[in-house]
Amino acid sequence: MINVLQYLQEFIQAVDKECFSDNLELQADPRCKIGLQNKWMANLEILKLQNCTESYAIPFSILALLKNLKELEVRDSDRVEAIFDMNDDTEITEAESQLKILTLNGLSELTHVWEKDTQRILIFRNIQEVAVSDCAKLKTLFPAFLAKSLKDLKKLKIASCENLQDLVEQEETAFVEKFVFPCLEELKLKHLPRVTCPKTFTLEFPSVKFLYVRDCDELGLFQSVYDPMGEGTSSSRLALISDPKVSKAS
């Protein structure tokens, strides 16, 4: 049996103290009664976690309480293996997540952001900005089920994740799928030596205005765009970032 009270107390201990600025009682004693903690979390819009000691940054017992959370930052932990615990028993509805900004930094053991690729993760489809850096064990960022629904994503920044292979999880399929991020305007990829072009689907960013790619040696999709011979990709892929509105930085 999972000790929910222990989960809650350890979660509160990891919260950046500035997140308690509107609740002096919690700031003074994070072990205060559960009712006050629950009310505080239900109204919380910005949450910063540091030095988490659990394998999940947001345990399933906490996830359903964060109904108004708009910005989440998790940083500096060698314990966190996944950010969101999408436990099969978690009672959540897609209307309960307002999360728009997700920042992950310095999570040396992180292997998944969302561990399970099920319909439940659609509660996160309102995300607009994602920034991930220094997460050495992360191999995939977005589960395929969620990637198909990220219609509001505007900024994506990934840096120094040396084992990252895919922006979107690859699935076995008999046909080539297309993932379109219609609102993405800024895409920044830096020091991702293993990230590669998808083999079973295509990625399209029709609204990209700023593109920064550096030290991504296996990412032929973007290298070929700057190839004056135009070799290596289909014309449909070239169109993703060859729009004259794109600002290219090196």
Image (spheres, rainbow, N blue to C red):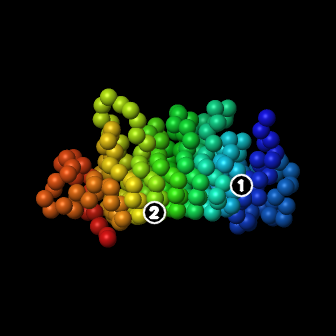
Q: Residue at the spot x=66%, y=54% of the render?
A: 79
The dot on residue 159 is 2
Q: Residue at the spot x=72%, y=42% of the render?
A: 61
Q: What amino acid is found at the position of numbered circle 2 in the picture?
A: Ala
Q: Position of residue 192 (x, y in %)?
A: 41, 59
Judge from the rendering whether residue 103 lies leftward or rightward of residue 230; answer left or right: right
* Quadrant containing the N terminus in the rendered view: top right
Is 225 placed above or below 140 here?
A: below
Q: Position of residue 107 (x, y in %)?
A: 59, 58
Q: Is residue 101 visible?
A: no
Judge from the rendering whether residue 77 lies leftward or rightward of residue 139; answer left or right: right
Where is residue 157, by image quadrant?
bottom left
Nearer to us in this view, 87 or 149: 87
- Helix, strand or loop at label 2? It is strand
Q: Tell which residue pokes out farthest to the bottom in this image.
A: 250
Judge from the rendering whether residue 215 lies leftward or rightward of residue 79; answer left or right: left
Is 16 placed above or below 100 here?
A: below
Q: Rate crowding at label 2 as few (under 14), some (14 to 19) or many (20 or more) other CA atoms within 10 Å.
A: many
Judge from the rendering whether residue 90 lies leftward or rightward of residue 198; answer left or right: right
The dot on residue 202 is none
**Residue at which label 1 appears:** 53
- Helix, strand or loop at label 1? It is loop
